[in-house]
Image (cartoon, rainbow, N blue to C red):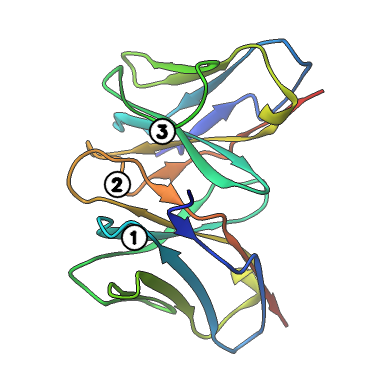
Amino acid sequence: KAGVTQTPRYLIKTRGQQVTLSCSPISGHRSVSWYQQTPGQGLQFLFEYFSETQRNKGNFPGRFSGRQFSNSRSEMNVSTLELGDSALYLCASSPLEGPTDTQYFGPGTRLTVL
Amino acid sequence: DQQVKQNSPSLSVQEGRISILNCDYTNSMFDYFLWYKKYPAEGPTFLISISSIKDKNEDGRFTVFLNKSAKHLSLHIVPSQPGDSAVYFCAASLLSGNTPLVFGKGTRLSVIA
């Protein structure tokens, strides 16, 4: 089975722009979670989708949004980018209904905001 | 407020010796704990987990110990190998309900040959 894939792998944007990141989960996985990883903060939970519905949301501003499609693929969008949004964005998929089940992570998208 | 804490940002261990990575949590409701390992340019990979009904779980060279009264867990790697050099994340959650994982900030382990 192919693993979790994320595109693009690297992205450079400037402040004020918006960005869309994509995640394709492992085939058959219906739960997709997104995390932001920064050097000082570790992995911080952004949101989780299951069957096209956002089921959990972390403590991030409304500039961060996401969605999930019927094929379980997911996108996250960040609008009005700030320098502090520079981070590694990780997507994880899970085979069962709960995010506490073993999550399989993609390699991440490295976003740099200039 | 950080609910899962890994107070050691880094740890160096000689090859063949034991590596002990520590994790503390503040939320007494957490009843499921996991360790993930992350290499550079890769996503984290699941290593081992433990539920609160156990105090120890072993998988090959990796053992996780849970002390509920102290709200503390540790990951032991014996013997340590150079390939174990990575960042290790501790995570916690609730078995019941669809609650997200809460991760610590990670500990960078360096195993020196």
Label 3 is found on which chain of the structure?
A
Q: Residue B28, image x and y in percent?
A: 28, 60
Mark 2 burial class by Cα count in 10 Å: few <14, some 14-19, many 20+: many
Q: CA distance from mark 2 to mark 1?
A: 9 Å
- Of badges 1 and 3, nearer the viewer stands 1
- SS type, badge 3: strand
Q: Closer to the N terminus: mark 3 or mark 2? A: 3
**What's the distance in space between the residues labelled 3 and 2, CA to CA?**
11 Å
Chain under numbered label 1: B
Instruction: Give the residue drawn at x 39%, y 34%.
Output: A26
Q: Secondary structure at mark 2?
A: loop
Residue behind mark 1: B33
Vertical position of residue A72 compared to residue A34: above or below:
above
Q: Name the one closer to the observer, B29 or B62.
A: B29
Q: Residue at x 33, y 49 (%)?
A: A102
Q: Residue at x 34, y 41 (%)?
A: B100
Provide the chain ID for the residue under circle 2: A
The residue carrying pointer 1 sits among few (fewer than 14), some (14 to 19) or many (20 or more) residues within 10 Å by Cα, namely many
**Which residue is the site of mark 3?**
A33
Report the amino acid beneath label 2. Answer: Thr
Residue B95 is situated, as x and y percent measured from the top left of the image, at 21, 51
3 and 2 marks in contact (CB < 8 Å): no
Label 2 belongs to which residue?
Answer: A100
Q: Do the residues at pointers 3 and 2 share their chain?
A: yes
Q: Nearer the viewer, residue A16 or A53?
A: A16
Q: Which three-letter amino acid code belongs to the residue tagged 3?
A: Ser
Q: Residues within 10 Å of mark 3 (few under 14, many from 20)?
A: many
User: Which image quarter: residue A48?
Assistant: top left
